[in-house]
Amino acid sequence: MAVNTPEKASFDVIVLGSGAAGLSAAVTAAGHGARVAMIEKEPVIGGTTAWSGGWIWSPRNGPAKRAGIDEDIDAPRTYLKGVLGNYFDAKRVDAFLKAAPEMVSFFERGTALQFDGGFPIPDTYGHVAGAGTGGRSVIARPYDARDLGADIALLRKPVRETTFLGMTIQAGADLRAFMTMTRSVKSFAYVTKRTLLHFRDLALYRRGMDLRNGIALVGRLLKSARMAGVDIRTGQTVTHLNTDGSTITGVVLSDGTNLSAPSVVLACGGYPQDDTRRAQTFPRNEEHRTLAVKSANGSGLALAEAVGAHVRTDIARPAAFCPVSTVRWPDGRVAQFPHIIDRGKPGLIGVLANGQRFCNEGLGYHDYVEALLRVTPEGTPARSWLICDHRFLRRYGIGVVRPQPLPFKQWIKRGYLKTGRTPEELARACGIDANGLTQTLADWNAGADRGEDPAFGRGTSPYMRLQGDPEQTPNPNVAPIRKAPFYAVEVVPGSFGTFAGLATNENAQVLRADGSVIGGLYAAGTDAASVFGGFYPAGGINLGPAMTFGFIAGRHAAQTGANT
């Protein structure tokens, strides 16, 4: 780690945080000629981004246009207006839609960050005017971490729950190969090769080097930051922001060091680990479980509030919700598993303690938790159970339980996976109403035999169908639940990160309560209030705004500094 010296104590832009937003701001500012320092409180780079799926919602992006998907800006704008309703912020939404493709082009042109397009990925609410049917998302291309050299030590490792022995698996063709390896010679060969190479990397480097998903995004951005000359400082904490009374002049580190800069970008990860703020804003906070890193404790919001910034909580929901299940590993570690993929597969339903379904399981993960919170009476725990049969378990897996050929009975012994030879026996194991579950399964199976879901309409939109299994006909999201034994995993409200945050304008500048700008102070990622008003209109709407407003902040700060 570099020692602070007088000649290195002055910068044009200082970025706090090293997730997608922070790295985007740092690389962009440096790419526009600014001297940039990026400060991370943890010893590793990447924040919660490193644990994410890595998809970036960025309508009208370059990869889509090159693939022939070229739409007018009015289409995504109309869609967002329809989804957000009264929470539609025209200035910020328009800034996002204009800058998102510019951000993708900037990184493609001159950095190590290159993208693949999400051409078949539709928006969540296909019935809303302007909904996209594909091409509005991008993802970082897989990345060989050996390209980082010694900087690989700075890269946060992926989490155990969503990887195979530390190997990241990307949604799409990569994941399909793993899911079908016992039914396809081609898939088996592909998976065998990937696994053997991963074992080689574990032996040589003690970690996977074929990076995919969010960790590939972070790895490529870290390489880009080095290429751009960003001064990266890990393991350092900022205690407060310096001002001259009206504008930012720099930061003070915990060891007393002063770093001067006319612009500071806050990208510290929001407040998912701040118990006090969560208790003030989260519904059923005591039951809520976050998937965010421990360091996302609201420090960016606190720094900004100390210089007069306003925190917005007037949004639809305070966080990006996701149903989670609690995993207890043999070594005593306790973690949360995000149920993103399994809910849309055919042959699984979600039920309450009364044994009855309560939502369309194939819609977005945010929608599942919204429905669970809505139907659970006060005084009753907000929990549900994902129910499947033996055929489903071995074909798709459920939660942390992997599909065949991997073993699963250890999860029954640990209490994570409940089981029963009959629906009644499964209900008793879960503590839910046996009559209710039996009737629910009978109703589900009657519709599933016809490929229908009369109660909630599974499989009736492009988004839902993509989550399903194309081999299941006539409806890729619907199949009977009959093959004993039966299984269940308990899921509760969780979230990826916060939506409530600092008030910002279309330039990512932080605002006071009266709407005035705090000169030199910017916020991006989950430190800033959601540009989508607390809604979840598509996959990738966490990283999309994080990358885009990080880009906007870095560019604006660099250009403002050049003009002063």
Image (cartoon, grey):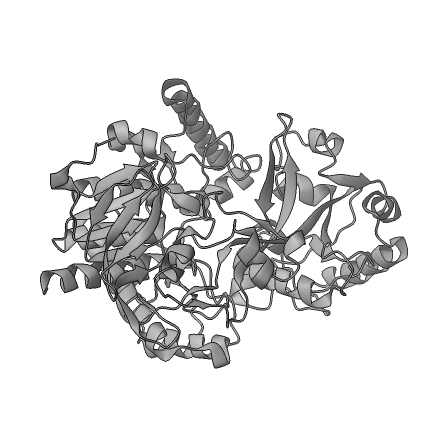
In percent of width and height, residue 526 lies at 42, 57
Image check: 403 left or right of 419? left
Residue farthest to the top, as pictured? 203
Reply above or below: 242 against 234.
below
Which quadrant of the structure image shows residue 255?
top left
Residue 477 place in picture, x, y as percent: 62, 58
Viewer-side residue, 506 vs 263: 263
Relative placement, left or right, of 296 versus 429 is left
* Viewer-closest of 549 and 16: 16
Q: Is residue 66 left or right of residue 360?
A: left
Instruction: Report x, y in % for residue 407.
Output: 65, 29
Residue occupying image coordinates x 75% and y 57%: 351
Q: How many marks?
A: 0
State the residue in front, 267 or 120: 267
The residue lying at 45 percent from left, 33 percent from top is 167
Identify which residue, 296 or 497, lies in the foreground. 296
Quadrant of the frame with the C terminus: bottom left
Outermost bottom residue: 86
Does any portion of residue 310 appear in the rendered image? yes
Based on the displayed image, in which of its 4 quarters is residue 303 positioned?
Answer: bottom left
Q: Give the quarter of the figure containing the N terminus.
A: top left
Q: Is residue 387 positioned above or below 511 on the image? A: above
Is residue 137 visible in the rendered image? The answer is no
Position in image of residue 437 (x %, y %): 83, 55
| Picture residue at 57% right of the left edge, 34% below the top | 182
- Residue 230, compared with residue 503, is above or below; it is above
